[in-house]
Image (tube, rainbow, N blue to C red):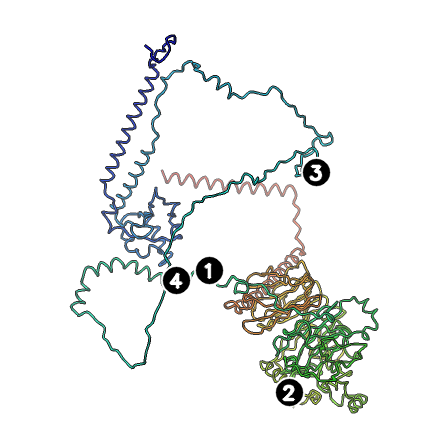
Amino acid sequence: MNTTGSENEPVTPRPETPKDLKTLLKSKDRVKSKTSMKSARRAKSAAKKEEVLEPTELFNEDIIPLVLTSKTQEIFQCVIDHDVTEEKPYKLIKKEDIINDMKTRAAISDFHPFKQLILDYPADELLVIYDRDFKYGQSFYLTINETMKESILQSFEQKVEEKEKEEEVEEIPDLKEIRSKVWTNLGSDVEIEEETVKESPTKMNFMISRIRRDFGVPVVFDDRSVSDAKDSYLECASYLDASFNIKILERDFGVQAVSKLEENSTQTKWTYPRNACTQYASREFTMEEKDEFFKSEALNDFVNSVALRFESALQQNEIMDVFYDDWKGLSDEESVFGGKADCHLKEYQSFTDLHKSQGKRISDIEWHPTILGLVAVALVDIITMEDRMNLTNRSLRSHSYILFWNFTDPIHPQIMLEAPDDIYSFQFCPTDPNIVVGGCRNGQVVLWDISKFSSRLQGILPAAKPNTVKSNLLPELDPAPPCEVPIARHCAVSSIENGHKAVVTDICWLPDHFEITKYGIPCENVEGICVQLATCSPDCCILFWDIRRPKASLQTMQEKRKIEKELQNPEGVPNTFKHLDLNWKPMHKVLLPKIGTNGEYSPMRISMREKCSDKVHEKAQFYLTGDKGEVLEYGSLDVPSTRDLTTLSEINTFLFIGTEDGEIIDVDWQVEKDIDTGKMTTPRPTNCYAVHDGPVNTVQRSPFFREIILTVGGWTFAIWKEGATLGPLLHSACALKRCTTGHWSLSRPGVILIGKEDGNIDIWDLLEKTHEPSQTQNISSVAISCIKPWIVSPKQHLLAVSDDFGTLHILEVPWALRHPLNQERSNVEGYFDREVKRLDYFEERKILRNTKKELEDQQEEEPVPTAEVKTPEQVEEELKKQYAAYLMLEKKVIFAQLGKKYEES
């Protein structure tokens, strides 16, 4: 009876279990029984595994720990986690391969310490096992016993089989007996109906079309703003709503307290000195104890256990330095700015004059030879030739100057040298820095004597005197600067009619150990001071000048009368070169006719191989700091007679010249007799190379190798070796911007600095790469006009760089660009020698190819013998003879084969 329901509610009987459900329960029981059987098998195998002893426990004496380097792992294909893993930690290596490795790499081989054990091993393969847990102290160990090897292999195979059995997929119960049954609704149809997805009653139709003229046109997708077009969708971008931010009130974090560490030291006080000495004797074993210790088994076991490791350590000590700091070896230089690894030029100082430098460019830079921190620059106007021709009265309105800058005052120059025209090149006298020579745009050569301002240039400013004349010119023509910068007028200027006819582009002092005669013959310089110089100009000649008093016999009566009058120079102008003013003439002239054609070369830069002696710096310092009685009087020096001079034959008399057309030539300045005319003239240039695609603006010799020369012109630069007549050793590719100047590094033989017209400086390191600059750094927004380095001290090198705005930039050279590499000079010299051999090899190959081509042309020109024309009867008769010879050959071959078969049978 149903006690919980109502009387009218029918009682539902409990359904009986169907046959299909019973079948399912039986299958589940089978699955459980099989699972229990598998677990039993696993427990049994685990027990069996525990009973099996590890092979390593049985044969510890037959196991050798190994250290295999990555190279050895690659050779024998046993790379960790690639060839040998935790699942398969062993590798069989052929004994022959190990022996070959020991022969090839000798003591470097990781198997070399166990060479004898490997050679005595009887089998052909050795077993190497990867020891992940370092059970034997190394990452690998080697078995030297065959029984041990088989036992280990068997244990690994057994482990693999057990693992495969464990990973077998459990059997799926057979459910084929389960039959489908009609579904009876028990009230879930409502939920199914609610979750069913039905289509909406109405559908929206969209039509997409395009203009007819766009049919077949490729579709191009692009981005556009929704606010620019009306037919675009409106983007609703997500944004952060501050009202829904959740404030974190609690946060989980851990705190660990660590005790403070403190290191202290103390030392006992030495109250008073006391003389004391201590003598002791070392404790030693007796002879019986020593014999007993040496015969003990503990010592033998210890020596046997560490012998192999000790031998391996000794070998490693011989191969490499175990005490070397690898961290420092990763980077030999500091990576901070200004450190050893920094290779950027750093701005140190800049100089510009608000009045004199405005609208002008710097044409030349020179560092003072003896006074540190003193640099001189020459300023020229940036105007065209047409504008210059229109300025006929320019000399009445302004003057050209050479400014001397000191680091103590970057705004006001120390002194200014006044010149009659723009100075494009000037030089300090190597033996007397107080003498300055410059070349003007109009072709004149100017001399200054600045000994009066030597104390000011050295930083010793004299006390101001009342009623001091500030300028020797009229105030309305050239007023004195407001900062009272002293102006030094020139002592002498050459005559216009006897000088150059164009701008003087380069000046070079002759060294102090020789001088030349009027015929260009080098002779010994008795005074030991620089008294002669050479100038070049695009007027197709090179002139040699002498600053001493000319011979009396060569002077005209008018000049003698002028000297006898002894007219005093204007106030403030020294009388050092009064004997040369306005009548200074060149003593020797070198013409440059072209090779093989009419015309002449237009020189722009010159360079001579001879240099001043090592004592020139001492002479310059002596004349700079000398007393008034020790100042050299050039007016008292006369040009010596040729008969009193000693001719020097070892002097190199060749000039290396860069021309206005981008050509490089070399010429001898000595006069020789012309065979055709019989006159004494300078010889023609010996070689001419058309290399540069613009005027040559730099011809400079390396400070380390006098025969190596750098030339810069147009969009390229080249490196030459004097004596190598086959061409340049290195010729750069055309740059994107024109090269305006260049200079060798004073401390690194393989570094070159090249200035560009875009204001950049290219730093070339010949030992690093020769096809492109190693570094490019921007210095100015306009073209670089000059570059001049200077060594202040071994730890400070400066680089003077000027531009077309009239600004002088002083840059500090970093450690990487001033500190030479190990054996850099020998490596650079070897590079130049290899390039010379390369040029010689190419020339030999060129000659050989030309010779072969001439022989081939001769063979082609030789008449080919005509073939004899045969009649048809003769042709037929020759064919019959050839066929008869073929039949005879065939018969011989057949008989030979039959004879071989008969012998074999």
Calculate the distance from the C-alpha at mark 3 to the C-alpha at mark 1: 58 Å
Identify the element where label 2 is drawn.
loop
Q: Who comes first in sequence, dot 1 or dot 4?
A: 4
Kindly report which numbered mark, 1 or 4, lies closer to the viewer in this rendering. 1
Name the residue beneath numbered marker 2. Answer: 527
Query: On the rendered image, what quadrant is the N terminus found in?
Result: top left
The x and y percentages for residue 399 are 77, 75
> How many residues crowd mark 4 within 10 Å: few (<14), some (14–19), many (20+)?
few
The x and y percentages for residue 64 are 28, 52
Residue positioned 35% across, 21% down in the render: 174
Name the residue beneath numbered marker 3. Answer: 228
Please say if the residues under marks 1 and 4 sit with CB atoms less than 8 Å apart.
Answer: no
Residue projecting furthest to the top: 8
Residue projecting furthest to the bottom: 564
Calculate the distance from the C-alpha at mark 1 to the C-alpha at mark 4: 16 Å
Q: In this rendering, would 748 be left or right of 99?
A: right
Calculate the distance from the C-alpha at mark 1 to the C-alpha at mark 2: 56 Å
> How many residues crowd mark 2 within 10 Å: few (<14), some (14–19), many (20+)?
few
Name the residue beneath numbered marker 4. Answer: 320
Q: Who comes first in sequence, dot 1 or dot 2?
A: 1
Which numbered marker is on residue 330? 1
Calculate the distance from the C-alpha at mark 3 to the C-alpha at mark 2: 89 Å
Q: What's the amino acid at mark 3? A: Asp
Q: What's the amino acid at mark 1? A: Leu
Identify the element where label 4 is drawn.
loop
The x and y percentages for residue 705 are 58, 72
Determine the image quadrant of residue 378. bottom right
The x and y percentages for residue 625 are 62, 84
Residue positioned 28% across, 56% down in the render: 116
Kindly report which numbered mark, 3 or 4, lies closer to the viewer in this rendering. 3
Q: In this rendering, would 854 be left or right of 893?
A: right
Please say if the residues under marks 3 and 2 sit with CB atoms less than 8 Å apart.
Answer: no
